[in-house]
Amino acid sequence: MPNFCAAPNCTRKSTQSDLAFFRFPRDPERCRIWVENCRRADLEAKTSDQLNKHYRLCAKHFDPAMVCKTSPYRTVLKDTAIPTIFDLTSHLKNPHTRHRKRIKELTDEDIRKIKERRLQSAEQAAKNEAVEDSTATSEDEPQLSTEEKEFREYLRSLFEVMVMLGKQSIPVVAGKIFETELESNNFLAILNYCMNAGDDALKKRFEATAVNSEYLSATQQSQLLDIFENTVREEMLMEVRESRFFSIVTGDLVEFAGDKHLPLFLRFVNQHNVLREEFLDFVPFDGDEPALVERLEAQLTDRWGLSMEDCRGQAHKATGTYSTKMKAVAVLLMEKYPLALHMPCSHLALNIHIANCLPFPNVQIVMETLRRIGSFFKTPLTQEELERAISTHYQKNEEKANALKQQASTDWTQQHNVFDVLLDILPPLLLCMDNIRDNDDGKFTGSVSADAYSITEILAEFEIIVTIVILKNVLTFTRAFGRNVQGETLDVFFAATSLTAVLHSLNEVNDNIDVYHEFWYEEAVNVAALMEIPVTVPRLFVRKQRLADTGEIQAESYYKEYVTMPVIHGIMQEVEDMFSETNLKTLKCLSLVPAVMGQMKFNTTEENYADVYRSDLPNPDTLPAELHCWRIKWKHRGKEVRLPTTIHETLQLPDVKFFPNVNSFLKVLSTLPVLKIEGDKSGTANERLQAYLDSVPAKQWNKSLAMLNINTHVRHDLDVMVDKYCRLYAEDDPESEDKSEATEETTEETTEETTEETTEEAAEED
């Protein structure tokens, strides 16, 4: 929501300039002076709390000396600041102009009181300034000593090295100095290189460090990382606070030193109307669902200063048994904050997300095997072996072989049609795994051969074949819907209107389960026969059946009851939960995008869905009239004007500022996790996290370095980091410790020498 300046004859608003806007003060006396100087008669009857909440003045009405820029993103006023610069006459040049902010006419008595008050204020300000000057002079006199300046330069060099470590994913390793040479490790080796390259600050510090003492201890390295991490995070949080609305996105669990952590991302629209999704931290995953919800809330509110009341969406990319826990977390969060809508995430294909959420062991084995296959074929030479196996298996069908090779060269385990591709590629995949397991030419390591053997054993089970076939056929009904709902804006809007048809198709399958299962079971039997896999019932079930003495069950009946029917019911339930009535209402609000309005012949009815976000709009009462004007604007545009096709394009239009409700609506919609991020050239934060995890051995994963590596694009001010370090850890300066130790050593040596001399003199006298 833009801020409008309350000053007479001032038409500035926050979305049209880089000016800072300041709230009226809560202090009643100061607030009264602000109102008096504004000459707004209509503001005199309002309380200071009302004025503080609803009215702003832009920086143009304050003396520049009263405005302080504490950082590139934050501007504040001095405590004694009073607005004194106003235009009270320009409206007289055009008397027919109507003004919302009417200027109060002053009486002689008003003028006399204002003069007296200003005189008193000037005298008080002069006194305060004199006190400040004398204090500043006394404070500024000491200045930084030479040692302090050198220490700050040394810290700056260390932080520069940290920047490089973060960008290059180089792990930090603690080390010591032995015989004036740095022990061989990453961090200290880089410091050594920098010293040899001419970094005087590091070199001087090194030369002053005592032999056999730590040049930079593990504790100090940890302190540097903490400062760096918190500074980078604060830069991103300032943008989130300015944008107000955000959504939560969590990723797959990551393990550090044996403890599982949940990657936490925030989605928001920044001040340039660009959708951002940034990685903020790793949250410990221990405890039950209420404890995890409480931890997430504490992280966002207590530590980061955000409000969960401004959370408009949540998505949780979980797998296996953790998906059940994260669904419970989502439900608990929605009970507390109903507008934090639970949706699938645009990072993950909808069909994969649905399958991950099914709480059946056979389905989870299939999904875990898919993840292992995706990771396996990132190993050198494995992809070439797979392509050779495809050529061998489909040597009589070259067209099919080429199509499969092209699919296998992409990240097919993450696509909407993953189960179709898996069934097509299954025979050559098993052939490939057998060749790698045999390893006749010795190209592969023992661990790679062992992985190939393990994957083959899983895929050669008939239960897994049936599960893959059932997933492929049932999720066919959601494949097009999922591709659209995670696609372009126009596709998302029409997908929201087509969910009824998807559920109708799934219900039809459920009602005719006998017929569908017969076809699907036959398909699974044919696939198994092709690979010479016997048709069997799982051994565990057979043993339980024998113990219960319930008689023998046929394989087809078993798989209908324990695979087909649970999978269909589970998928239907997941789709209904992820796309509830409220979620669909929200997605239908995408008709605010002009291209969608054009497809709908400008007969859209956003008013019917606006209640979801009514409290987020600046002027909800004028929404119907504003939407009417918005439709008319685009309906009667010139032929040469192209309709914007996405929220991002629409928000970049200069005219959208004249439609404050539409502008706010689009910004909130843009944060929904299901919508894809557009124009992110550096890749999503989730992709950058995965790149870090893939490039660094698991034993060397570091939470702080992962945070820095993912967010190297975020501005980082080294001087701010140095200031923070000096403020928090100045007393831990090892140089001061070295000096004290040196003093102690000197004292000890002097004492020893004195004792020896005294003893020798006594011996001579005797």
Image: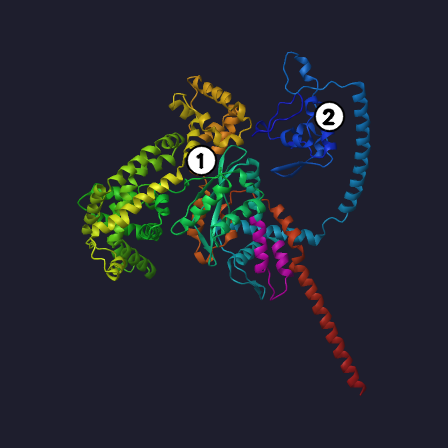
The residue identified by callout 2 is 37
Q: Position of residue 541 (x, y in %)?
A: 26, 57
The residue identified by callout 1 is 679
Q: Is 574 placed above or below 488 here?
A: below
* Residue stretch in magenta: 201-229
* The quarter of the displayed image where residue 493 is located: top left
Q: Position of residue 110 (x, y in %)?
A: 79, 22
The residue shown at (49%, 46%) is: 264
Tag count: 2
Q: Is residue 553 left or right of residue 308?
A: left
* Residue 589 at least partly seen: yes
Q: Position of residue 643 (x, y in %)?
A: 42, 23
Q: Earlier in the sequence, mark 1 or mark 2?
A: 2
Q: Is 250 placed above or below 185 here?
A: above
Q: Are marks 1 and 2 in contact (CB under 8 Å)?
A: no
* Residue 405 at least partly seen: no
* The quarter of the displayed image where residue 544 is located: bottom left
Residue 340: within the magenta?
no
Q: Is 622 placed above or below 21 here?
A: above
- As drawn, which residue projects farthest toward the left? 396
Q: Along the line of sight, which residue is nearer the eye, 434 or 193?
A: 434
Q: CA distance from mark 1 to mark 2?
A: 46 Å
Amino acid marked by disc 2: Asn
Provide the secondary structure element on which disc 1 rests: loop
Residue 210: within the magenta?
yes
Amino acid marked by disc 1: Gly
- The label nearer to you, 1 versus 2, is 2
The prevailing secondary structure element of the residues shown in magenta is helix
- As drawn, which residue projects farthest toward the bottom? 766
